[in-house]
Amino acid sequence: MVDKSMPLLYTVNDIMKIFHLGRTKAYQLMESDGFPSFKLNRRLYVESEKLNKWLEKTAGRTYNY
């Protein structure tokens, strides 16, 4: 069942807010290997469910973006 309080897809602007990143750093993160983003009509998106799984998988690691 879909939780209507959460978006299905996050945009670069959403990632900027979630991780407190600037635009360039958010793009670098979303384009990095292992990050679950995809392009649709030249725009980057990440599914909320896949983002949560990525966060669980990478917990405790240090990233510099």
Image (cartoon, grey):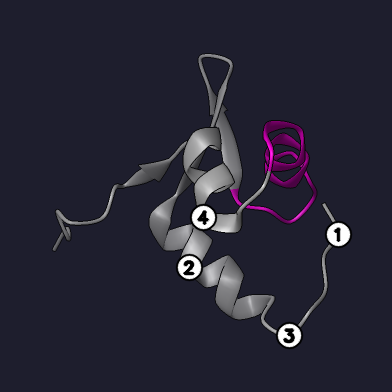
Magenta-tinted stretch: 22-36
Q: Residue furthest bottom?
A: 60
Gap between marks 3 and 4 measured at Cα: 17 Å
Residue 22 in the image: state x and y as whole percent: 69, 39
Ranked by sequence position, the earlier of labels 2 and 1 is 2
- Identify the mark at residue 44; answer none if there is no mark: none
Few, some or many C-alpha atoms within 10 Å of disc 3 (few <14, some 14-19, many ≥20)? few
Ranked by sequence position, the earlier of labels 4 and 2 is 4
- Identify the mark at residue 60; answer none if there is no mark: 3
Gap between marks 3 and 1 measured at Cα: 13 Å
Ranked by sequence position, the earlier of labels 1 and 4 is 4
Residue contact between numbered discs 3 and 2, judged by CB atoms under 8 Å: no
The residue identified by callout 1 is: 64
Q: Is residue 17 left or right of residue 23?
A: left
Image quarter of residue 27: top right
Residue 9 sits above or below residue 35 on the image:
above
Q: Nearer the viewer, mark 4 or mark 2?
A: 4
Q: Is residue 48 left or right of residue 64?
A: left
In the image, what residue type sits under mark 2?
A: Asn
In the image, what residue type sits under mark 1?
A: Asn
Gap between marks 1 and 4 measured at Cα: 15 Å
Q: Which secondary structure, mark 4?
A: helix
In the image, what residue type sits under mark 4?
A: Ile
Residue 60 in the image: state x and y as whole percent: 73, 85
